[in-house]
Image (cartoon, rainbow, N blue to C red):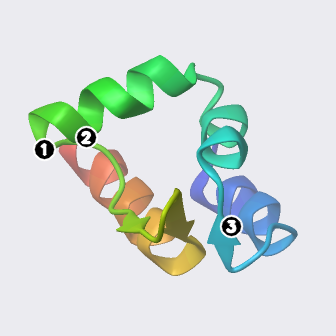
Protein backbone atom coordinates (compact mmCIF):
# COMPACT_ATOMS: atom_id res chain seq x y z
CA UNK A 1 0.00 0.00 0.00
CA UNK A 2 1.46 3.34 -0.97
CA UNK A 3 1.25 6.35 1.30
CA UNK A 4 -1.06 8.05 -1.23
CA UNK A 5 -3.44 5.06 -1.27
CA UNK A 6 -3.34 4.87 2.53
CA UNK A 7 -4.20 8.57 2.82
CA UNK A 8 -7.16 8.29 0.45
CA UNK A 9 -8.44 5.23 2.26
CA UNK A 10 -8.18 6.90 5.65
CA UNK A 11 -9.94 10.02 4.40
CA UNK A 12 -13.19 8.09 3.99
CA UNK A 13 -13.14 6.87 7.61
CA UNK A 14 -14.56 8.70 10.67
CA UNK A 15 -12.31 10.92 12.82
CA UNK A 16 -12.44 8.47 15.77
CA UNK A 17 -12.10 4.84 14.72
CA UNK A 18 -13.20 1.75 16.61
CA UNK A 19 -10.84 -1.14 17.13
CA UNK A 20 -12.85 -3.08 14.53
CA UNK A 21 -12.38 -0.31 11.96
CA UNK A 22 -8.63 -0.09 12.60
CA UNK A 23 -8.20 -3.86 12.49
CA UNK A 24 -10.16 -4.02 9.23
CA UNK A 25 -8.18 -1.13 7.73
CA UNK A 26 -4.83 -2.69 8.70
CA UNK A 27 -6.09 -6.17 7.74
CA UNK A 28 -5.12 -7.64 11.08
CA UNK A 29 -7.10 -9.13 13.96
CA UNK A 30 -8.38 -7.18 16.96
CA UNK A 31 -6.28 -9.54 19.09
CA UNK A 32 -3.16 -8.27 17.32
CA UNK A 33 -4.11 -4.67 18.14
CA UNK A 34 -4.70 -5.58 21.79
CA UNK A 35 -1.34 -7.39 21.85
CA UNK A 36 0.42 -4.36 20.36
CA UNK A 37 -1.16 -2.10 23.01
CA UNK A 38 -0.04 -4.47 25.75
CA UNK A 39 3.54 -4.23 24.42
CA UNK A 40 3.34 -0.45 24.00
CA UNK A 41 3.44 -0.71 20.20
CA UNK A 42 0.76 -0.01 17.63
CA UNK A 43 -1.25 3.09 16.89
CA UNK A 44 -2.17 5.43 19.76
CA UNK A 45 -5.68 5.10 21.16
CA UNK A 46 -7.95 6.88 23.58
CA UNK A 47 -9.75 4.90 26.25
CA UNK A 48 -13.29 6.29 26.45
CA UNK A 49 -15.05 3.25 27.88
CA UNK A 50 -14.02 1.67 24.59
CA UNK A 51 -10.85 2.20 22.62
CA UNK A 52 -11.03 4.92 19.99
CA UNK A 53 -8.23 5.60 17.54
CA UNK A 54 -7.96 9.20 16.26
CA UNK A 55 -7.59 9.04 12.49
CA UNK A 56 -4.76 11.60 12.41
CA UNK A 57 -2.82 9.66 15.06
CA UNK A 58 -3.25 6.48 12.99
CA UNK A 59 -2.02 8.37 9.92
CA UNK A 60 1.09 9.53 11.84
CA UNK A 61 1.74 6.05 13.21
CA UNK A 62 1.50 4.59 9.70
CA UNK A 63 3.96 7.18 8.38
CA UNK A 64 6.40 6.15 11.10
CA UNK A 65 6.02 2.52 10.10
CA UNK A 66 6.94 3.35 6.50
CA UNK A 67 10.09 5.15 7.66
CA UNK A 68 11.03 2.30 10.01
CA UNK A 69 10.77 -0.45 7.43
Viewer-proximal residue among 34 and 3: 34
Which quarter of the figure is the N terminus placed in?
top right
Which quarter of the figure is the C terminus placed in?
top left
Residue 47's x, y, as percent?
39, 65
Q: Residue furthest left?
A: 39
Q: What residue is pinned by disc 2? A: 37
- At horizontal 36% and vertical 48% (from top left) the residue drawn is 66
| Local crowd size for mark 3, using a 10 Å CA cut-off: few (<14), some (14–19), many (≥20) | some
Label of residue 7 in the image: 3
Which quadrant of the view contains residue 41? top left
| Local crowd size for mark 1, using a 10 Å CA cut-off: few (<14), some (14–19), many (≥20) | few
Which quadrant of the view contains residue 35? top left
| Local crowd size for mark 2, using a 10 Å CA cut-off: few (<14), some (14–19), many (≥20) | some
Looking at the image, residue 35 sits to the left or right of residue 7; the answer is left
The answer for how far apart the CA atoms under marks 1 and 2 are is 5 Å
Q: What residue is pinned by disc 1? A: 40
Residue 43's x, y, as percent?
36, 54
Viewer-proximal residue among 51 and 69: 51
Looking at the image, residue 47 sits to the left or right of residue 12; the answer is left
Q: Could you say whether the residue bearing mark 1 is in a helix, strand or loop? A: loop
- At horizontal 42% and vertical 73% (from top left) the residue drawn is 57
The answer for how far apart the CA atoms under marks 2 and 3 are is 23 Å
Closer to the chain start, of discs 1 and 3, is 3
Viewer-proximal residue among 49 and 11: 49
Q: Residue furthest front?
A: 49
Tell me whether the residue at label 1 lies in contact with that at label 2, contact meaning CB atoms closer than 8 angstroms: yes
Closer to the chain start, of discs 2 and 3, is 3
Residue 6's x, y, as percent?
67, 55
Amino acid sequence: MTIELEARSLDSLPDLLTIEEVADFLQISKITLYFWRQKGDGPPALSMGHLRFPKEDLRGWLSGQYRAS
